[in-house]
Image: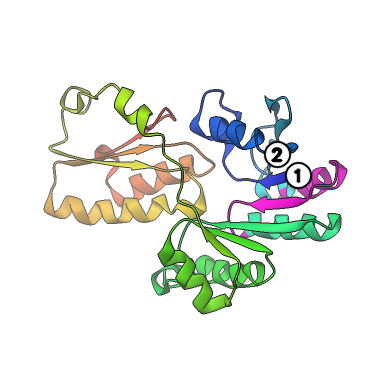
Amino acid sequence: MRVLVISSDSNVFTEGSAVARRFRLQAQTVERLDVLVPHGPGNLVQIAGNAAARGFGLRKTAGFFRTIAAGWRLQRPDVVSTQDPFLIGLLGWVIACLRGAKLHVQVHTDVFDQNFSAHSLGNRFKVFLARFILSRADLIRAVSERIRTSIEAKVGHLHISVLPVYIDPERAVRAVPLNRRQKYPNFTKLILSVARLEPEKDVGGTLRIMKQILEIEPGAGLVVLGKGSELNSLQSLAQELGIEANVVFEPYQDPF
């Protein structure tokens, strides 16, 4: 089986990252695995002997069309798998239609929860797009039973599998404990947010909630661990909210 993955996670280009290791494991089960990251760095890396990842070093709009072109040039995949049902999902659907491949869509958040659509106009558009993409998928992977039930209620899709995000417990055992009081001596309480800094992760929502927390616990601190296209805008948002002294943006590293 030849599989093409459309991803928004540029950590695949970081050697030794959990994402790169996960794709390497997946490559062992298929004939060919290609990963396209529309707004990832302009790199082509070999993940394994039968697997490669390509980014285009462009913003999302330009990267969108470059990804379609790359999907057309690759050897025809049997399955196109997308890591969300939004713009990444739309990309996957277009390529699957052009190449005559099956469409597999992964869903990591409850897009049909009323709080999701109420958050912003952009999220309401995402709900519309998700309904369009999921109704056309050949197979859907949800990360929890709650999300599977939500999709069935709104889309009526019968081919939904539940597969939580894989966590390696041995890495947690081997991890060296962090002396948080030494590293963050000014914080009486510490909150850790581990996420890709991309729109679908809504780290901006985390910052707004942090502002409310500081009204009750002024000595609290938020550590944001991750990287992505929204880093600069999130740093600016922290300043606008007046909480920059209580928020630390750490560069990407092993979350454990």
Query: Which quadrant of the view contains residue 182?
Result: top left
Query: Which quadrant of the view contains residue 147?
Result: bottom left
In the displayed structure, 109 sits above or below 14; it is below
The residue where tag 1 is placed is 1
Say which element carries label 1. Answer: loop
Which colouring convention does the figure follow? Answer: rainbow
At 39% across and 49% down in the image, what residue appears? 237
- For the residue pair 188 and 166, the one nearer the viewer reads as 166
The verdict on residue 85 being magenta is: yes
The residue where tag 2 is placed is 30
Are dots 2 and 1 in contact, CB under 8 Å?
A: yes
At 43% across and 37% down in the image, what residue appears? 226
Residue 90 in percent (x, y) is at 69, 60
In the rendered structure, the answer to whether residue 146 lies left or right of residue 69 reads left
Q: Earlier in the sequence, mark 2 or mark 1?
A: 1
- For the residue pair 255 and 1, the one nearer the viewer reads as 1
At 64% across and 52% down in the image, what residue appears? 82
In the rendered structure, the answer to whether residue 135 lies left or right of residue 233 reads right
- For the residue pair 206 and 102, the one nearer the viewer reads as 102
Image: magenta residue range: 64-86
Mark 1 closeness class: few <14, some 14–19, many ≥20 residues within 10 Å: few
User: Could you tell me the amino acid type at mark 2?
Assistant: Val
In the displayed structure, 245 sits above or below 132; it is above
Residue 139 numbered tag = none
Q: CA distance from mark 2 to mark 1?
A: 5 Å
Observer able to see residue 160: yes
